Image (tube, rainbow, N blue to C red):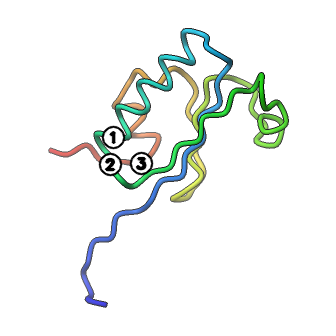
Amino acid sequence: MEKGLNILPQYNLKLFITGASPNSVKAISNLKIICEQYLTGRYTLEVIDIYQQPEAAKTEQVIAVPVLIKLSPGPVKRLVGNMSDTAQVLKGLQISEPV
């Protein structure tokens, strides 16, 4: 393998929502747009409705929704809200905006 290759990390994300509430719908839409724009082909996104999967929320100790959990690359990060502030989401995911 050649040295100096810039291998971009794969992002593993979980978004916890509450059914089809307005904030949940916005969070899904906003996050998908951000991921497609900045992480095309480099992310997995699992959307978890805490009404349908309460055990998953308990396991991840979710206390506010919508919440995005970035599992990898480390460190694990949590972002709460509808993901409408792109700059804040990118900062939380530790992604640099292109210049």
- The residue depicted at 50 percent of the width and 23 percent of the height is 27
Q: Are marks 1 and 3 in contact (CB under 8 Å)?
A: no
Quarter of the image for the N terminus: give it: bottom left
- Spot occupied by residue 19 in the image (x, y as percentages of width and height): 67, 17
Q: Are marks 1 and 2 in contact (CB under 8 Å)?
A: yes
Residue lying farthest to the bottom in this orientation = 1
Q: Amino acid at mark 1?
A: Glu
**Dot 2 surroundings within 10 Å: few (below 14), some, or many (20 or more)?**
few
- Spot occupied by residue 86 in the image (x, y as percentages of width and height): 35, 29
- The residue depicted at 68 percent of the width and 19 percent of the height is 18
**Dot 3 surroundings within 10 Å: few (below 14), some, or many (20 or more)?**
some
Quarter of the image for the C terminus: give it: top left
For marks 3 and 2, the one nearer the N-term is 2
Report, in whole angstroms, how far the alpha carbon at label 1 lies from the one at label 3. Answer: 16 Å
Foreground label between 1 and 3: 1
Numbered mark located on residue 94 in the image? 3
Residue lying farthest to the left in this orientation = 99
Numbered mark located on residue 46 in the image? none
- Spot occupied by residue 31 in the image (x, y as percentages of width and height): 44, 31
Element carrying mark 2: loop
Q: Which residue is mark 1?
A: 36
Q: Is residue 38 left or right of residue 47?
A: left
* Quadrant of the image occupied by residue 84: top left
- The residue depicted at 45 percent of the width and 44 percent of the height is 93
Q: Amino acid at mark 3?
A: Gln
Is residue 61 depicted above or below 98 in this figure?
above
